[in-house]
Amino acid sequence: MTIAIVIILLVIATLAFHFISPWWFTPLASNWQAIDDTINISLWVVGIVFVAVSLFLAFVIFKFRHNKNRRADYEPENGKLEGWLTIVTTLGVAAMLAPGLVVWGQFISVPENSVIVEVVGQQWHWSYRLPGKDGKLGKTSIKLVTEDNPFGINVNDINGADDLLIKSNELHLLIDQPVKVLLRSKDVLHNFAVPQFRVKMDLVPGAVTFVWFTPTKLGRYELLCEELCGIAHFTMRGYVKVDSAKDYQTWLANLPTFTQTLTRDPANITQGKQHYAGCASCHGIDGQGNEAMNAPKLAGLSRWYLHRQLSYFKQKIRGQNSNDLYGQQMAAMSALLPDEKAIEDVSAYINSLAALKNTAASTGDVIKGKSFYKNCSYCHGEHAQGNYAMNAPKLAGQHPWYLKRQISYFQQGIRGAHPADLYGKQMILMSKSLHDERTVNDVVSYIDSLTN
Ligand SMILES: [Cu+2]
């Protein structure tokens, strides 16, 4: 009797949870109503079966409860009942699967008027490429990926010349225009998923996969990497913005072609040197850093990293936290660099300065530090030389006091917590693997022991 009641309560609670709970599909923003319908049909079928079977079970438990005067019948075969059950089960399973087959047919039949967009995944960010006026994407190869050619486009393929490159994590799409999204990964498996569009697909290294959809609602939607295996894919966020024709054209007009990205003005090192004059009072004339001013060493850092940090300081992405006194100082100083060109030039100039070794000896346990550093080497490189492909800067040669402060700031979310700071967020996550001050000290001593 108790068990029968428990089962009935379970059914009521499940139904109540289903109908009252706030967790349901996000509002649909694409043509894929059919996917919602299939999911709903499946839910109805399994829901009805669940309720019917559970209530039947409760009924049977109650009806045939223990009674001293009753004996159980033995009835191993019942042709009629088995026949009915087979028919009903077949219908139920067919009702769940058949609509899925129809929808799958639509899923793999890309409409002829669709346009192509390429989405490139890498640990842990998104970038995008459009085919340009010729409507054709240039051939690519992972082997061709460099700092100047991050998409790895083959320069000998004429189709690639007018490809439009989007290095930001935000893709724009034109409303009501069917789009075929080609998916490519530079490293491991990723998964392209915008909940509002319903369709999702894995990115597989070495292959090009695709999804198609028609965005039907203006708005800015979050793009998630729904790859669960591996580390940190949840930090891999992007945005897809669905634009009206006018907004879309404005956005499109500002995208550089592949050829333009290759032939951009080279940075002007002489100008960069002039800009650097204002920096030397804190960072030193040779970029050697100055502990008294809390200013880190800059000599030896890569252009792309310098460029990103200076842009972050200027755009108020780094150095804004109220506890980040030193970052705030630097953010104020970024005003010395009036524009993008100045940032490029000064980065090139700093990059031309010779890397400098530290003189003071570190106090931590280098052997222990080495074993902790293993995790870090995955991104920062075995010799802490930095790795452009992982967005991770060079650490070797940097002053230990600065490294310790940055690690502690990441741990406390003083650096890297700004919503636009995708790379900082990865580092926040990683910094938490160093559990105490002693460990931090050991790792930093090991980094300091790497001459580079
Ligand atoms: Cu991913």
Image (spheres, rainbow, N blue to C red):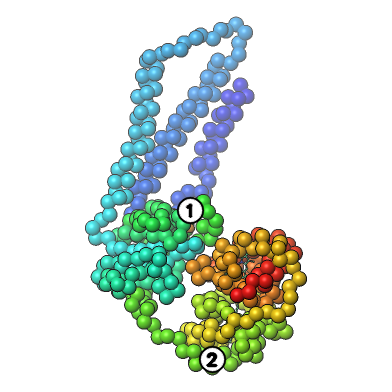
- Is 187 in front, or is 116? 187
- Is 171 in front, or is 432? 432
- Tell me the kind of residue under disc 2: Lys
Q: To which quarter of the image does residue 213 belong?
A: bottom left
Reading the chain from its start, which is encountered first: label 2 or label 1? 1
Q: Residue at x 52, y 44 (%)?
A: 20
Determine whether, in the image, residue 247 is placed left or right of residue 326: left
Q: Position of residue 171 (x, y in %)?
A: 40, 67
Q: Is residue 108 above or below residue 386?
A: above
Q: For mark 2, does the 10 Å Cα neighbourhood hold few (<14), some (14 to 19), or many (20 or more) residues? A: some
Determine whether, in the image, residue 321 is placed left or right of residue 275: right
Between the residue at mark 2 and the residue at mark 1, the CA separation in whole angstroms equals 45 Å
Q: Residue at x 64, y 63 (%)?
A: 373
Residue position for label 1 = 227
Whether residue 342 is visible, yes or no, is no
Q: Is residue 102 above or below residue 376?
A: above
Q: For mark 1, does the 10 Å Cα neighbourhood hold few (<14), some (14 to 19), or many (20 or more) residues? A: many
Which is in the foreground here, disc 2 or disc 1?
Answer: 2
- Is 308 in front, or is 75? 308
Q: Is residue 55 above or below residue 98?
A: above
Question: Element at badge 2?
Answer: helix
Q: Residue at x 53, y 85 (%)?
A: 352
Determine whether the beta carbon of the residue marked 1 sits less than 8 angstroms from the nearest atom of ligand 1.
yes
Residue position for label 2 = 273
Q: Position of residue 313 (x, y in %)?
A: 57, 79
| Quadrant of image for the N terminus | top right
Q: To which quarter of the image does residue 203 belong?
A: bottom left
> Which residue is at the far left?
112
Is the C-beta separation of discs 2 and 1 under 8 Å? no
- Tell me the kind of residue under disc 1: Glu
